[in-house]
Image (cartoon, helix red, strand yellow):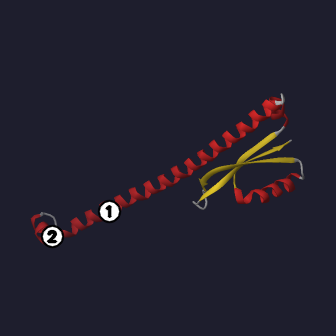
Amino acid sequence: MDAYLAERERPASVYIEDLENELENIEKDIVDQSGSYDSTDTNYNKLKELELVLSETKNFYLGKQAISSIGSEMSSMFTTLNGVINISNIERFKRMVFRASRGNAVTEIFETDTKMKDIKTEKMEQKAVFMILFK
């Protein structure tokens, strides 16, 4: 190492400063890439949840239209709220919706075999799709 520094025209302290600057730049790049990965992972999970909601609610509406002819009339009579919930929270969620709506909402739960990554805990958990119908 000493022979390497002796051959250079600049003093050794300059090389150490250059090395520190380069390491700082690399550290900034790694932190930026880590943040970008986290946001991409979160967006991916949200899109997978949305895909699950769309596929399950599509099956619900197509099944209702096949049974009866009220398909478009039913969707105009009710407002719907859809989402994804952990299987372990289903009963508590149903009670909360019933109390908040004073019994004026219907909650449909579609249990799936899909395990998805929970955004907050980052653990793989079984999810269910909920659909709240209210007027």
Residue 64 tag number:
none
Residue 103 at x, y percent in the picture: 89, 51
- Horizontal arrangement in the rendering, residue 88 relative to residue 94 (left or right): left
SS class of the residue under badge 1? helix
Under mark 2, the amino acid is Met
Residue 124 at x, y percent in the picture: 59, 58
Alpha carbons under labels 2 and 1: distance apart:
19 Å
Q: Where, quadrant-wise, is the N terminus in this rendering?
A: bottom left
- Horizontal arrangement in the rendering, residue 128 relative to residue 25 (left or right): right
Q: Residue at x 90, y 53 (%)?
A: 102
Residue 31 at x, y percent in the picture: 43, 59
SS class of the residue under badge 2? loop
Under mark 1, the amino acid is Leu
Residue 1 tag number:
2
Q: Where, quadrant-wise, is the C terminus in this rendering?
A: top right
- Horizontal arrangement in the rendering, residue 16 relative to residue 98 (left or right): left
The quarter holding residue 60 reads top right
Q: Is residue 117 above or below residue 7?
A: above
**Structural crowding at the residue carrying mark 2, measured as other residues with C-alpha within 10 Å and reported as few (<14), some (14–19) or many (≥20):** few
Q: Residue at x 66, y 39 (%)?
A: 55
Q: Residue at x 82, y 53 (%)?
A: 97
Residue 38 at x, y percent in the picture: 51, 55
* Residue beneath disc 1: 23
Q: Is residue 50 above or below residue 13?
A: above
- Horizontal arrangement in the rendering, residue 71 relative to residue 4 (left or right): right
Decide which of 89, 13 is in the foreground and name it: 89
